[in-house]
Image: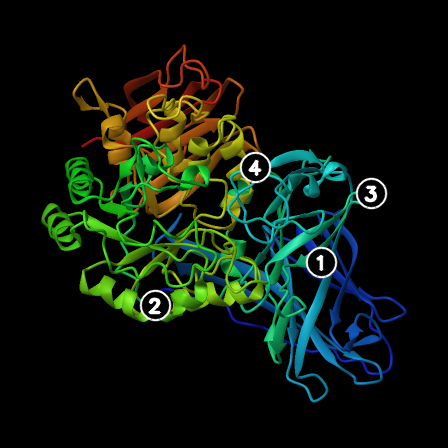
Amino acid sequence: MNKYYLLSFMLVLFSLTSCETEPESLTLSSPDGNNQITFDLTEKGEPFYMVAHKNETVVDSSFMSFELKDLPALADNFKVTASQVETLDETWEMPWGEQLEVRNNYNGLMVSLEEKDGEKRKVNIHFKAFNDGVAFRYEFPEQENLKDILILDENTEFNLTGDHTVWWIPGDWDIYEHLYNETKFSEIDALSKRDVPDLAATYIPENAVNTPVTMKTNTGLYLSFHEADLTNYAGMTLKVDPENHRMVSELVGSERLGGKAQLSLPFNTPWRTIQIAEKAGDLIESKMTLNLNDPNAIGDVSYFTPMKYVGIWWEMHIGKSTWDMEGSQDMNTWTTGKVGSSQHGATTENAKRYIDFASENGIKGLLVEGWNTGWDQWLNSEDREGIFDFMTPYADYDFDEVMRYANEKGVEVIMHHETSAAPLTYEKQMEEAYNFMKANGMNSVKTGYVGKIIPKGEYHHGQWMVNHYQKVLEKAAEKKIAVNAHEPIKATGKRRTYPNAIAREGLRGQEFNAWSADGGNPPDHLPTVAFTRMLSGPIDFTPGVFNIKFEEYKKDNRVSTTLAHQLALYVVIYSPIQMACDLPEHYMLDGRVHPAFQFITDVGVDWQQSKVLNGEVGDFVTIARQERKTGNWFVGGITDENERTLNLTLDFLEDGKTYSANVYRDAEDAHWETNPQAYAIEAMEVKKGDQMDIRLAPGGGFAISIVEKE
């Protein structure tokens, strides 16, 4: 039996057919019986659904329709011609991830619809009910009277049952790099976020929110709305009707198409997903989005090794260095002209300095940005096509020597491809650029798409770009290359099908702390991200800033956390690649490596299992993860601007064993604003069931490494 797919139950199918009369409503329950989906038609033949959890209505009667160009809408006049049910319980293995094994257990219902008269067009609605939520998608079968369509709007409603508390970012068609807002649903005002500074490209046409969008009901239930398996379709935002507590799908459009998605039948839309949880942490532990994607389609990905890395990157953002050799670009403030004392960061000498630090401190990878020519042109150019070729180094960067030195020191170099948001050029370059990578022993690439998309009229999150990101994944897989995408399309679980999709940005990252003189990301940013953006997949957030107030370069900018909070992020914010983003000199203290850096050296990046120990959205969260290779445990906890003491019970450890624990925590006088670098390290002996109270300073955190004693 294939070890990756252990089937406990085979599919069980049966049909229910009706030609003359409408059937009674169809109901589907999750395996544990707690989540329920009901489907029905109105007298006019309009499809609608409802969702309940333990008899509490979560989504009330919500209609489903499509508007098509030059064709009548698919909205009513339907009858049910058949229905099929299915049950699946399987366990599959992740090649890398938050855990080794994932259980995929659901009950399914396929409802076949056909128009009663006229063209008698057909559409199927496929529902799945999991113990951790529900999902559905539209499946358009091949048919005589419907072949090619341009979708103007997909009108999938989510009719909420109250004025929930919502954590949201605006439904921007170009970028996800907005701060999260916490409001009542009735107070969502996405249009007020149109003029946010420091965004390379932004377009917010509606009062809509991006997904995942997380909510808490008045009864204490947690909901998160998203999508899974986004393939050959436009990304979905959710248009908000504040007065009626309703959301409607709003697909990202294309001015060139004059619509949202151009499709040929047969095709399936992405899954529309609703996670349902009684505890906030259960949202993080859910793997429903992954389970709604197809199994691994590319085979072995052992060429990618989960790793920590350093890089020539942060120094450009804080103003020490520039991406280009001439010193004419200052991307961190979107200005051009001489940058004063700044100098090119990607030099041979500087790269070797980072390689030495990585090699001496247990760091596997090195990222170098600004090594290739073109950075002196791209911000000035209206036509950004062909600026970068990804093979020609600046004169002060000896590519071959850096690669030789890195190989000698056992450090793997990560390639950087900034496409300047010119994807057509990149598609022409991929074959040669990826061959160049493989010829030089490089197995992973960080891609970037900063700026307005070329061709004009397309957006980062529209169907055209969704297909581009897919082409990159497929070509990279062909060349055995892993992709860490920045300025990406949202994660929708495709890493299950394409496990070379190792991470992506897709949020307001660490660099905003270097750009924004107003304090950058506030202390509650990452306690919110853990329950929103992180639900969709791995994040390349680039943690590890030790020089919290970088007054040497930017006196008005800073990171709004404590040092211990930065350490905790290596456990809390999941990614199979984690950057130690600060400068090597900032990891030194009194002529030696900073004692707190030991946690970064020790912490894992590839996990056997993960457990959320506690948490509330936007307030705090604690996560424990067990490393695959060593069996060691690591725990990370972070808080918002409020001081708090968290009680931990170490019930995840094994019975009868004794462990050595190193606790990295905030000092008694630590505070994110006034004393962020104050820390303490404690060593202790622990065993299963032990409890500990840990104080977190305002904006603070803690990190624990737990190793079995011999």
In the rendered image, the quadrant that contains the C terminus is top left
Front residue (pair 194, 67): 194
Residue labelled with disc 1: 37
Residue labelled with disc 3: 243
Instruction: Give the mark nearest the N terminus, 2 or 4.
Output: 4
Percent across and percent down for residue 664 are 33, 23
Percent across and percent down for residue 663 are 32, 23
Check the image and name the residue furthest to the top: 669
Residue labelled with disc 4: 179
Instruction: Give the mark nearest the N terminus, 1 or 3.
Output: 1
Looking at the rendered image, the disc whose residue lies closer to the viewer, 2 or 3, is 2
Numbered disc 1: secondary structure: strand
Real-space CA distance between mark 3 and mark 4, rounded to the nearest whole angstrom: 24 Å
Give the residue at x 34% y 38%.
316
Residue 353 versus residue 61 in the image, above or below = above
In the rendered image, the quadrant that contains the N terminus is bottom left
Give the residue at x 43% y 69%.
471
| Within-10-Å neighbours for mark 1: few <14, some 14–19, many 20+ | many
| Within-10-Å neighbours for mark 3: few <14, some 14–19, many 20+ | few
Real-space CA distance between mark 1 and mark 3, rounded to the nearest whole angstrom: 25 Å
Residue labelled with disc 2: 429
Instruction: Give the mark nearest the N terminus, 3 or 4.
Output: 4
The answer to whether residue 654 shows anywhere in this view is no
Give the residue at x 60% y 54%.
173
Real-space CA distance between mark 2 and mark 3, rounded to the nearest whole angstrom: 49 Å
Q: Amino acid at mark 1?
A: Ile
| Within-10-Å neighbours for mark 2: few <14, some 14–19, many 20+ | some
Q: Amino acid at mark 4?
A: Leu
